[in-house]
Amino acid sequence: MRQQIAAANWKMNLTLQQAENLLDEILKAPYHLKTYQKVVLAVPFPYLLLAGQKIAGHNNFHVSAQNCYQKERGAYTGESSAEMLQSLGVEYVILGHSERREYFGETNSMLGEKTKLALSCGLTPIFCCGESLQIREAGTQNDYVETQLKESLFSLPEEQIRKIVIAYEPIWAIGTGKTATSAQAQEMHFHLRRVLAKQYGDAVAEEIPILYGGSVKGSNAKELFSQPDVDGGLVGGASLIAADFSKIIEALK
Ligand code: 13P
């Protein structure tokens, strides 16, 4: 059974006190998760340890970072390495979010290096891809997203690509309230799975979870997650509201 994931991306939000309250709120709800269903909390770096302590004993919950650097260690002031994350007990790392690509100049090749390093430290990368509105309007989104995957991931051997989670996040749907329709999400996820199958074969492509991100809310999660190739969501705004995020967790099929 392919894994299903409800992932929260808090981005650069919340004070320590607010973070603690939100974690407590999210964790107090009684969830009935199956073994293949997971909740991943991508909190800001300063709260990684706190989140790790809070989720202790909650079996299906995991902590994620939102980024790591593409070098092992050294004189890179202000950066955090994959090895540091591993040493904190962090299990996942979001890589290639469109905000990092846009505001911090992250390229496909840089993301290839980050992915390799993260995997070598035992972290599960949540690799983000997705097109801008301009590309969607030009109708070239399939090729664009395929290139993002190819240039960052396709030098990985089979046993490593199998450990990755992919998140499709159309930029025009992020923080805009404009969600892709479930049909648009399914169409792209199906395409991504075919691209993976062409490179690695059907069995591997069938195993890789593909999450949808972009204005996922408590009210639309069930419809999105009901699509056969949508294996959960990567959630920004709604993950900051406990009641909303709990509803999204419960929407895993
Ligand atoms: P929103 O859910 O706020 O649209 O953000 C999506 C996102 O960027 C998650 O990584």
Image (tube, rainbow, N blue to C red):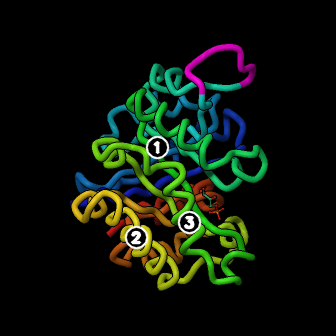
- In the depicted view, which residue is nearer to us: 106 or 41? 106
User: Residue 106 vs residue 55: left or right?
Assistant: right
- Residue found at x 50% / y 66%: 212
Q: Is residue 183 above or below residue 154?
A: below
**Viewer-nearest of discs 1 and 2:** 1
Q: Is mark 2 on a helix, strand or loop?
A: loop
- Distance CA(mark 3)–CA(mark 2): 16 Å
Quadrant housing the N terminus: bottom left
Give the residue number, with chain letter if any, for mark 1: 125
- Residue found at x 53% / y 49%: 152
Q: What stretch is highlighted in magenta?
A: 71-78
Which amino acid does the dot numbered 1 rest on? Pro
Q: In this view, does 227 lie above or below 242?
A: below
Give the residue number, with chain letter if any, for mark 3: 145
User: Residue 130 vs residue 36: left or right?
Assistant: right
- Distance CA(mark 1)–CA(mark 2): 18 Å
Give the residue number, with chain letter if any, for mark 2: 230
Q: Please, what is the dominant secondary structure of the magenta stretch?
A: loop
- Distance CA(mark 3)–CA(mark 1): 17 Å
User: Residue 116 vs residue 2: left or right?
Assistant: right
